[in-house]
Structures are given as C-alpha cells and as structure tokens.
Amino acid sequence: MELKNDLILRAARGEAIERYPVWLMRQAGRILPEYRAVRSKLSGFKELVETPEFAAEVTIQPVDILDVDAAIIFSDILVVPEAMGLEYQMLEQKGPWFEKTIQTMDDLKYAETNFDIEDRLGYVLEAIRLTKKELNGRVPLIGFAGAPWTIFCYMVEGKGSKTFSESRKMLYTNPTLAHELLNRITDVTISYLKAQVNAGAQMLQLFDSWAGILGTEQYAEFGLRYLDKIANAINEVPLTLFSKGAINSVNDLAKLNCNTIGLDWNMDAVAIRKEVGETRTLQGNLDPCALYASHAEVEKSTINMLNRFESQRHIVNLGHGVYPDIDPEKVKTFIKTVKNYEIRF
Ligand code: CP3
C-alpha cells in the first residue's frame, strides 16, 4: 500500500524532507481521554494489549487526535519476558510485577528461546496487521521491543526499581549467568522484531530505558554488545536505538548499524551532531516537563530545541515518554510548532 506520509522514513534514511516529522514516545496512552475510555471498559492493561482490535484502536487514536507523523503499535516491552516464560501482571498504580525472577542458572528454564513467535506473541502481530489495514497508508507504523539490558533488569528484579541493584549485582557476582540471559533475550528479540516487520511494521525502535544506570564500560559489555548483535541482524526497515541516560555511550551507539539514535533531554544535540555528523538521524529531545508550561512557553522551548538540531536528519520527539497528566492541548501545540517550523536546508 502506498504511504501518503513517509516523512519519518525519509528522515531516518537521511533523504530530503519538506519539514520535520514528529511523534511522541508513549503517545498512545493515558494522556488521551479516548484511551482511558477504551481502557475503562476492560479488565485491565493486559486485556488491551492482548486484544488486537482494541490495541489497533488505541494505536490509531494519536494519529486522528494529535496529527502525529507515525503510529507506534500499542503493546509493552514486557510481552517478551512473558513469552520466554515469566508471566507479568500490571498492577494499578504500582506498575509491572513478575511472580518468578531469574536468580540462578536453574531459573533459565523460565528464559526459553526455542518457541514460535506467532504462537506466543501472535496477538501483537495480529494487532500490527489490523492497524496497518485501518491506517490505510496514512502514516508509517513503528514496531518496538525493549533492549536486552532493560528486559534483563525486569527479569532479574521482577518489578520496577530506582536503582535495579539486584540486576547490577549479578553483573559482578555471576557475569556468566548475566551474559547467558542477555544472549537469550537478544535471540528472541531478533526473531520478534523480524516477525513485526513481516506483519507490517515499517520502522523499529529499541527502548533501553535503564541504560543510564550502568557505567560506560559496563554498558559497553552488557548493553552495547547486544544492541550491536540486534542492529546487525535487522536490515529490513530503519532502526532507532534509544539508550536513555547513556550520555557517555552515545558516540559508540552511533557506530552501530542503525539509522537513528534517540536522545534524551540531558543529551546535547549540538555536541552529538558534531561527533556523528550526518551519518545518523537524531531523534528527540524536548524535556517532557516542558509541556507543563503555558502554550506560549511550549512554543518557545520547542523552537529552542529545534534550533539545536538544524539538519534534515532529525526526527522530532520528546526526550522520553510523555507524562500521563500532560494536557493533550499542549501536545498539540508542540506538534503544531514543529510542523510550522521552516527548515533551512
Ligand atoms: O504509545 C506508545 O509509546 C506505545 C506503547 C508503549 C507502552 N509501553 C504502553 C504502556 C510502549 C512503547 C511502552 C514501552 C515500555 N514499557 C518501556 C520503555 C519506554 C520507557 O518509558 O522507558 C518500559 C520501561 C515499559 C514497562 C512498563 N509498562 C512500566 C514500567 C509500566 C508502568 C508505569 C506506567 O507508565 O504506568 C508500563 C505500563 C504501560 N505501558 C502503560 C502504557 C500505556 C500504562 C498502563 C495503563 O494504561 O494503565
């Protein structure tokens, strides 16, 4: 099917664009009353994720309501550990919770790799197929997965954490187990991303949300090494790597076989552009909290951010997911400001 708006794909490949493409991480979700309405009819978050018709509906909501230049499939990074053998629950107000975790070599029986993706994650693939049909070529559809290090954190810790000290502890006390688990997550993630492309995903993003809690050397060994493996295996569609907080690793990340590097709001677009040149597209990076300010201030901080990139290799986004209590009207101001910004190249 012919795409009516392929701006984001062109920006990812470094081709000419008329204006910057824009979308938001976590755009499908609680900021929209329309999402909360669908969600309130259901038993919980997992029913939404696991029912392709509902997942497709909330995936398309931000395209209709916010006018973004891409849709991202509604799912979660935690579907991968679940498919491997660790079931999760999403507790209201608390977040994810796993009954079992990986602590010993014996626990690796809960980290299976030898299964059919369609069999265990077919609901995500069906949601992608349905969304593609309903989008009817309006904008590209982004598929995603968690990066191995971030998935490792949830499989070892079993829940969210500020420090993920159990996960970091294993890197010192049992690096062999850590590498074995990371390898397994990597293998499943590669198959899962390829299955998403076969189902219709036109672009992929890896979320390494907990990259920033490792030192530079440890992130090279336990993070980048596995991102490298994935980036080399995925050549079908443009790939974005987003390693939140990994300020000292951005230049090494940019050397991997990907199209786009995601920047959080602490990362300096000017310095990073100087380092990577025009070899990679940069995505980001307005502070999500900037959207709490007045409409006039949102416009000002958006323009300030855009002025720091000044390249056709820029996909506009926030520096992390949009916070659930942000007024969608402020998001619209952000998006309108990007769309009205005249590019000068
Ligand atoms: O719009 C989109 O970006 C697509 C959907 C999406 C969700 N989660 C839906 C979701 C995506 C891309 C994710 C990724 C994800 N999930 C990450 C990486 C990105 C990041 O924010 O760093 C992580 C770490 C998770 C794990 C996760 N999922 C946590 C820790 C939580 C609980 C905290 C919270 O935000 O509530 C979730 C739940 C979740 N995933 C929600 C949504 C819309 C909220 C659930 C609800 O509706 O109640």
Image: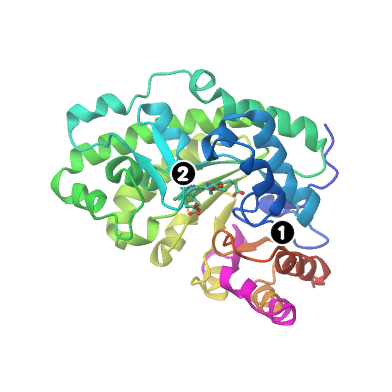
Does residue 287 show up? no
Real-space CA distance between mark 2 and mark 1, rounded to the nearest whole angstrom = 21 Å
- The residue where tag 1 is placed is 22
Label 1 within 8 A of ligand 1 by Cβ: no
Image quarter hosting the C terminus: bottom right
**Three-letter code for the amino acid on which mark 1 is drawn:** Val
Q: Nearer the viewer, residue 93 or 193?
A: 93
Give the image location of residue 61, x and y in percent. 74, 46
Give the image location of residue 144, x and y in percent. 56, 41
Give the image location of residue 133, x and y in percent. 78, 30
On screen, residue 168 above or below 115: below
Label 2 within 8 A of ligand 1 by Cβ: yes
Image quarter hosting the N terminus: top right
- The residue where tag 2 is placed is 146
Left or right for 281, reference 149: right
Which stretch is magenta? 275-300
